[in-house]
């Protein structure tokens, strides 16, 4: 089951796909919801298991891959999912320099790189809406360009419940959550160290 809107973690992933370096860390400030929140149910065929690392090691040692097989027809499973459909967002974000930033790193330098890449539609890998099966297409909303109009259905205040803010990689991949509220089609995302964020 999907959240009602894209999570800050997924939004950060989109920005990371456009420009990421160890010297910067993206923070999502606001998510503007432009289209009605609609869901769709789908079924996907997936492989039920993986080839074990021990099997791979054994094949490498023996020099043959004869026993290194996984037959899809024998290990197929269907997985149902409820997903968002026909979405559009404006993501407002900033980045901070990390302790890994060098003397040559500056906010202006990385902002210029990001803007240039976003203008050209460039990315290191295809951004996605949280999982790779659902690609995200993007364009830069330049300064001076008005915010696209939001659909009337997203304007009333709405409690979106507890939503994933991001993963705390420094503390054992701990998920961190916040109580998401949509007001006027906008979700205000609390800062990482805010008291509103709960592990």
Image (cartoon, grey):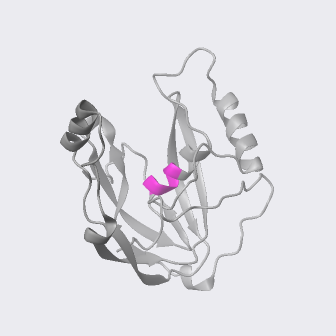
Q: Is residue 154 above or below residue 88?
A: below
Which x, y percent locates residue 120?
A: 77, 48
Horizontal placement of 92 versus 57: left or right?
A: right
- Residue toward you, 181 or 42: 42
Query: Could one spot residue 161 in this view of the protein?
Result: no
Establish if 50 lies above or below 134. above
Residue at point 45%, 59% (across, down): 130
Q: Is residue 10 magenta?
A: yes
Q: Position of residue 95 (x, y in %)?
A: 55, 39
Q: How many marks?
A: 0
Residue at horizontal 26 percent and vertical 70 percent from the top: 74
* Residue 149 seen in render: yes
> Which residue is nearer to you in this view: 191 or 63?
63
Q: Is residue 44 magenta?
A: no
The single residue placed furthest to the right in the displayed view is 144
Q: Percent from the top left, x then y, of residue 50?
A: 26, 54
Read off the magenta span.
8-13
Which of the 4 image quadrants contains residue 91?
Answer: bottom right
Work out whether residue 70 or residue 150 is closer to the camera in this orientation and state it. 70
Q: Is residue 117 left or right of residue 182?
A: right
Side (left or right) of 18 relative to 7: right
Q: Is residue 174 above or below residue 171?
A: below
């Amino acid at each position: 089951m999907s959240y009602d809107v894209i999570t800050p973690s997924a939004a950060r992933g989109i920005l990371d796909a456009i420009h990421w370096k160890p010297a910067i860390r993206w923070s999502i400030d606001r998510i503007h919801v432009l289209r009605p929140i609609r869901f769709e149910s789908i079924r996907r065929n997936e492989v039920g298991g993986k080839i074990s690392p021990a099997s791979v090691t054994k094949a490498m040692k023996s020099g043959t891959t004869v026993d290194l097989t996984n037959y899809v027809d024998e290990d197929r499973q269907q997985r149902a999912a409820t997903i968002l459909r026909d979405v559009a967002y404006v993501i407002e974000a900033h980045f901070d320099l990390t302790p890994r930033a060098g003397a040559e790193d500056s906010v202006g330098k990385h902002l210029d790189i990001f803007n240039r890449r976003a203008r050209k539609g460039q990315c290191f890998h295809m951004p996605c809406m949280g999982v790779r099966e659902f690609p995200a297409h993007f364009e830069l909303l330049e300064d001076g360009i008005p915010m696209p109009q939001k659909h009337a259905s997203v304007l009333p205040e709405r409690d979106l419940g507890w939503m994933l803010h991001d993963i705390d990689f420094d503390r054992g991949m701990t998920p961190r959550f916040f109580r998401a509220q949509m007001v006027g089609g906008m979700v205000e995302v609390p800062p990482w160290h805010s008291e509103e964020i709960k592990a």
